[in-house]
Amino acid sequence: MTTIEDKYKALATDNAPGQETRQKTGNIEALMRGDVMAGTPVDFSHGDVDAFAPTPGSFEAFSAGVEVGGKQAYTEYRGALDIRTELAAKLEAFIGAPVSADDGLIVTTGTQGALFLAVAATVTDGDKVAIVQPDYFANRKLVQFFGGEIAPVQLNYINNDQNAGLNLGELRGAFEAGAKVFLYSNPNNPTGAVYAAEEIDEIAALAAEFDATVIVDQLYSRLLYEGVPYVHFRAVSDRSDNIVTIMGPSKTESLSGYRLGVAFGAPKLIERMEKLQAIVSLRAAGYNQSVLRTWFNEPDGWMAERVALHQAIRDDLIRVFHGAGFETRVPQAGSYLFPKLPTLGVDVHDFVRLLRLQAGVIVTPGTEFSPHTEASVRLNFSQDHTAAVAAAERIVAMAHRYKA
Amino acid sequence: MTTIEDKYKALATDNAPGQETRQKTGNIEALMRGDVMAGTPVDFSHGDVDAFAPTPGSFEAFSAGVEVGGKQAYTEYRGALDIRTELAAKLEAFIGAPVSADDGLIVTTGTQGALFLAVAATVTDGDKVAIVQPDYFANRKLVQFFGGEIAPVQLNYINNDQNAGLNLGELRGAFEAGAKVFLYSNPNNPTGAVYAAEEIDEIAALAAEFDATVIVDQLYSRLLYEGVPYVHFRAVSDRSDNIVTIMGPSKTESLSGYRLGVAFGAPKLIERMEKLQAIVSLRAAGYNQSVLRTWFNEPDGWMAERVALHQAIRDDLIRVFHGAGFETRVPQAGSYLFPKLPTLGVDVHDFVRLLRLQAGVIVTPGTEFSPHTEASVRLNFSQDHTAAVAAAERIVAMAHRYKA
């Protein structure tokens, strides 16, 4: 039996993005080569909401929620019905499949909250869950926390093909071995890969064949680069009792400070998620829910400009890393870049600490996303353009300095 | 083995406060006696933040958080260090025992979030947990969700003695039977009972004797009525590795719409709670955390006035219920009242629905708090004074109408 100590050991946050200030640097000085590099510090562990500001009108929408008063402070656990009604219509139009405001949608405390509740609603002791490697680091932790077993499925993402590179044979194998749930992010975190239509079709066919539940995290599906086709899983599969889609306005829209997300799909699972949310946090903060009125409702041209600005940063960073010979997929969507470093003479976790101390650059080590990607680091490039490019150049310089 | 269906059946929210709008009323008309009563509708399932407004300056503190920008949006999972530092000093002064900003305090998504994380950090499959009956309804659900077993301890609260009425013999019995955790609210929810110094001393002694962890929910500990002494558990017991205290500004301060709470105490447990919060919601909404700067920092006289206004409502409601011969403890703290209804000719859940449909009054059935309190209903009397008294009179009239 798993002890509670083991359970929490598996939830280690020592290398998690945003927790760097809690790290003890130990005797890292002994490893140091060279001096501190000049330059504007950049924290690539998350997007910079000062560089890319929250959606216009978001604060005003919050204020209006406070003005509404008690009705907005105490909503149903799944969120205020009027807000769910507005959202359902917008999400339906976005994904091209029905979304029910009454019984098929829940407002959560961020996309993280939605993921937590969705995994809790589908996974219990001993259940096998197919998880992509690499993928968002919390996916694995969530499955383990609820006593599930991970059936890993590789994503051969270091290519610049039109598909994401999912090993569909491994996915079939996971289902054959008994996996009843498949959880994946599309666009993929940390690589920015987008699943091709054929991959989505095949995932849908396999899920149907093995009667599996699919939880798809589409957090970044609004930040698509030029010419990239995107297929919503729910639009392809009509197994509406077995699909939960997760989204939120924390990334492209820079509304992370409000902690808002949504999950929509199978009423049976949404109901479980609401029951659990009732004891986890009661609800997403009532006033904050009002901010969702700005979502899919941005000023004309605002989203297109935001995408173009991110694409320009992406292109410059790719130039830096490809120029240095680092294998790096060109992200098709989102604001993550996952360059592979050359072989280093120091441990990757030490290198990440050295980057912070000597180059003023915070990145997230690849080990968070897969046991097979320790040579990579993740950058969230939703940053000041100039500072991000200079910081990328310092990463390259540091990698050369610490080469094996 | 518990199936996932059973797990969620135990989390039923059908009769939970705030969820009334989701209830199907079925063929309740067949039970109806008499007409609809005139009067201002009152929702006693939670406090009315329109009647008792949020702390002055709370919205401005939120705005200031938004102005801070990225640093406030992305805090450590356990909350922003500067805010934790301010809070630790204030909480230390309030409870009369040390609180460490660095490793002994976490900001959570409401007091509910703190309870969820604290139970998760201490209870796993098969663990016995001593739970008071009656007590806050989520306590039982949380223990069951994490696979724990409940060892019930009765609270003989229908008295107006100076103690809460905890059966200390049963608490000893629970520990002897193997309970390793004791979870209780003080002031008690739903009765407003406050534990006497001798009760706290004895709980501390028993917890020490059996090396048990104590989680104490002190949510209402600032709303104490005239002449009521209050003892902070942590000030009595120095077993600092085995105590977690939970509080929040959602009730007395009417800040529920911001979803903020705190837990403080044993560093080992706070660390687990942070690791779990990282996958539950990442953090309490960053901007919202700023509102905690107003906590224990209210304008002079504001809190005293708020307490006096609640005491006046309490006194009038007690007059109504005692006048009608309903057994009702006089709450020593908080804004809950838990009157016992006379024997009715209809099921209590039907009566609660009838109250809503015919009297415009929402209350929470006593079954939520203990299997032994189905004759009681809970009222949160943080309401407009006049409307609350009139609504209480309608409850009495309805109870007479539906008498057995």
Image: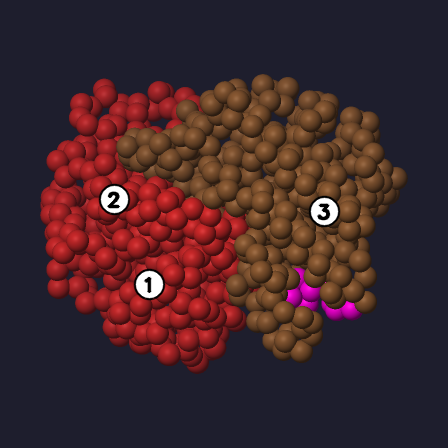
Chain colours: A red, B brown
Amino acid under label 1? Glu
Q: Is residue B214 left or right of residue B40?
A: right
Which residue is identified by label 1? A86
- Quarter of image, res A15: top left
Viewer-nearest of labels 1 and 3? 3
Viewer-nearest of labels 2 and 1? 1
- Quarter of image, res B303: top right
Q: Where is residue B142 in the image (x, y as percent from the top left)?
A: 64, 51
Amino acid under label 2? Pro
Residue at 67% in and 70% down: B34
Magenta stretch prevailing secondary structure = helix
Q: Position of residue A283 (x, y in %)?
A: 48, 51
Q: What stretch is highlighted in magenta?
A: B345-354
Q: In this view, does A301 lie to the left or right of A381?
A: left
Q: Do labels 1 and 3 share a chain?
A: no
Rounded to the nearest whole Å, what is the CA distance between mark 3 and mark 2? 51 Å
Residue A76 seen in the current view: yes
Residue at 21% in and 46% down: A56
Q: Are marks 3 and 2 on the same chain?
A: no
Residue B320 circle label: 3
Quadrant that contains the C terminus of chain A = top left
Q: Report the front residue among A284 and A169.
A: A284
Q: Which chain carries label 2?
A: A
Q: Position of residue B332 (x, y in %)?
A: 71, 34
Residue at 21% in and 50% down: A328
Rounded to the nearest whole Å, what is the CA distance between mark 1 and mark 3? 43 Å
Residue, far right: B169
Mark 2 lies on a secondary structure that is loop
Residue A54 circle label: 2
Q: Is residue A31 left or right of residue B272?
A: left
